[in-house]
Image (cartoon, rainbow, N blue to C red):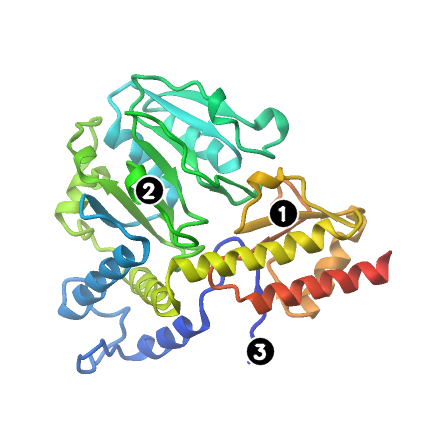
Amino acid sequence: MSRAYNFSPGPAALPEDVLRRAQADMLEYVGPGQAAAGASIVELSHRGPEFLDVAQRAEVDLRALIGIPDAYAVLFLAGGATTQQALIALNFAAMGQPADYVLTGHWGHTAIKQARPYVDVRIAASSEAEGFKAIPDRADWRLSADAAYVHITANETIHGVEFRDTPETGDVPLFADFSSSIASEPLDVGRYGLIYAGAQKNLGPVGITVVIVRRDLLERSGQPRAGIFDYRAHLAADSMLNTPPSWNWYLLGLTVKWMRDEGGVEVFAERSRAKARLLYDTIDGSDGFYRNDVDVAARSRMNIPFFLHDARLDAEFLAGAREAGLIGLKGHRVLGGMRASIYNAMPVAGVEALTAYMRDFQQHRS
């Protein structure tokens, strides 16, 4: 079997070591220091000792990997980040209370759409008028003193825009969608009130989301909601208020452990810088054959959209890339063009292969 280099934005590539371990455990699970369970990990009860050990180790490893203080709870929840965007408003804002949103791309729009039925959404800053090519200057943000929270999208997967610094929001807690950049570099969790991340980019498979929340914020009453929508209830039940996505949780645990074994976020930060630099240098050095429109100071390290000088070449570029073992490069329908997602599981060799193909394609089409 020959595996391609997968540049898909999500579901994204998983480390091959993780897939091979999961392949073995799919038939019969054997946990560290445990006897064979006699059944697949997907067949075992989430209340049984084997899976309880999986869940506990996943949290321990995630806390160590990212540096999550004890003052923060960690939840592993079904569904994606979009679900959390609605639950955040229900759990932390009073009915009709304002909440400030900084809009920097498509997923910021989605976050606003999910929250709008429950809070008075206020756009504190937006780069939409400029085509979502930059981060609005912090000095120009219009924050509300009575806001329940300030929300940002740390990395915009589609538009390729990333916050490179943590913005200061005073006494109002900062909430952030880190779906596509979590664990890619050191993160000062203590500067956030809440961090959430769909797993399917850097942490594991689609279908499970991590929520990291400051415990004192859970004391807020929020709005009337069913128990299944209450973060406090999920915390009290160790994220097992109902049957959790146990396979997804297990794979997340394997992925987090792999990242720790590889050297942790510091190692991945250096790899991310090297991969992004290699790809941006290829784009910028192409004399206009390729282009990236994002302001250099806000360019994402994880998702790099780029365009050929002639869109009529797009289909040929993608077909040739697939023949070269490079998949998942088609841009999102919102923007078109190409997009290379280079999350933690993408090796430097994969980006080297992509840039070599890009140079070769340019040479034969110029």
Q: Quadrant of the C terminus?
A: bottom right
In the picture, the disc for residue 195 is 2
Instruction: Residue 178 in the image: state x and y as whole percent.
Output: 40, 45
Residue occupying the point 70% across, 69% down: 323
> Is any part of residue 191 visible from this angle?
yes
Label 1 vs label 2: CA separation? 25 Å
| Mark 1 vs mark 3: in front | 1
Point out the frontmost of discs 3 and 2.
2
Dot 1 or dot 3: first in sequence order is: 3
Q: Secondary structure at mark 1?
A: strand
User: Would you say the residues marked 1 and 2 are in contact, meaning their CB atoms lie under 8 Å apart?
Assistant: no
Residue 32 x/y as whole percent: 22, 77
Residue lying furthest right: 366
| 177 w.r.t. 124: above or below | below
Residue at 71% from the left image edge and 66% from the top image edge: 356
Q: How many marks?
A: 3
Residue picked out by circle 1: 305
Q: Give the left or right position of residue 101, taking residue 332 as reference.
A: left
Horizontal side, residue 157 vs residue 183: left or right: right
Disc number placed over residue 2 in the picture, else none: 3
284 lies above or below 251:
above
